[in-house]
Image (cartoon, rainbow, N blue to C red):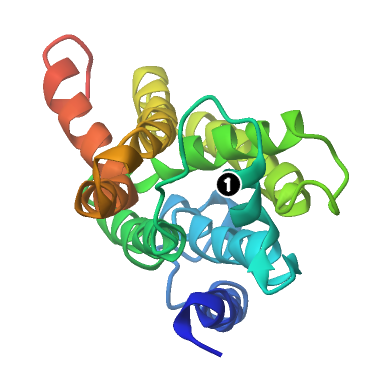
Amino acid sequence: MNFYFLWSWIGLAIAIFMIYLLFFTDKLRSRKISRFKDGAWYAWLPVPIYLLHQFEEYACHITNGQFDIVSRFFTGNLPFDTSNLPLEHFPLVNISLVWFGAPLAAILFRKNPVIGFSYFGFMFLNGITHFAGGLNPAENPGVVTGVFLFIPSAIYMIILSAKEKILSTQQIILAFMSGILAHIFLFFVYFLAPLGKVLVFVGDILCGFAPIIFAYFGGKIFHRKFIF
């Protein structure tokens, strides 16, 4: 099995390890309180959740030697031309996003909680797109984790931030919108397909870190207007 089909299985192994660290050790906790009141701990949750989503979306849906979700990009009625979208795009954008981007955001939480929580907005919009695609897992790869993990965890981020006074209302909006804008940027990457692989790959890597980028520069732009 080559890496194109193996990466989501590697992600599953990482997810299991992350779940162990999160729920059976104190290594990712900042305080001896309930895990679900600890913002620094909760900032790590997108990593295993999204890895599980990727496993469901890719490894669990293969037909005739190809990922079902990839096949949909080349046979579905999409609002953009994906006929030139390279297959490398799919592992690259997912790995950039969850193996590197989301862990970096969690690490940065203690210094900048807005960045730390920025990937929840990305997951929320992704979950909404899956919900809009129908609740049949056979026809909508990734819908189970997208709807039942992404959306509730994103909503709880808002509740946690407000209840524990981790973020102000303005900061919650900025964190959430940073992830949403990053997901919109992912749609923009598809429009780069006719322009060649290099631009797509650059877009994929930027997309992986886009929630952090939007949260950082958003904080700079609105710093004088809002209390950060």
* In this picture, residue 207 sits left or right of residue 139: left
Q: Hey, which residue is sitting farthest top in the picture? A: 225
Quadrant location of the C terminus in the rendered image = top left
* In this picture, residue 141 sits left or right of residue 16: right
Q: Quadrant of residue 180?
A: top left
Looking at the picture, tell me which residue is in the foreground, 112 or 49: 49
Looking at the picture, tell me which residue is in the foreground, 84 or 128: 84
Relative to 162, residue 117 above or below: below
Relative to 68, residue 60 above or below: below
Question: How many residues crowd around disc 1 within 10 Å: few (fewer than 14), some, or many (20 or more)?
Answer: some
Q: Hey, which residue is sitting farthest bottom in the picture? A: 1
Do we see residue 185 in this rendering? yes
Q: Position of residue 27 (x, y in %)?
A: 43, 78
Q: Position of residue 112 (x, y in %)?
A: 24, 44
* In this picture, residue 63 sits left or right of residue 185: right
- For the point 41% across and 49% down, the residue is 85
Q: Position of residue 132 (x, y in %)?
A: 74, 28
- For the point 65% across and 47% down, the residue is 72
Quadrant location of the N terminus in the rendered image = bottom right
Do we see residue 110 in this rendering? no
Indicate the secondary structure of the residue bearing disc 1: helix
- For the point 28% across and 48% down, the residue is 200
Q: Which residue is mark 1?
A: 74
- Label 1 sits on what residue type? Phe
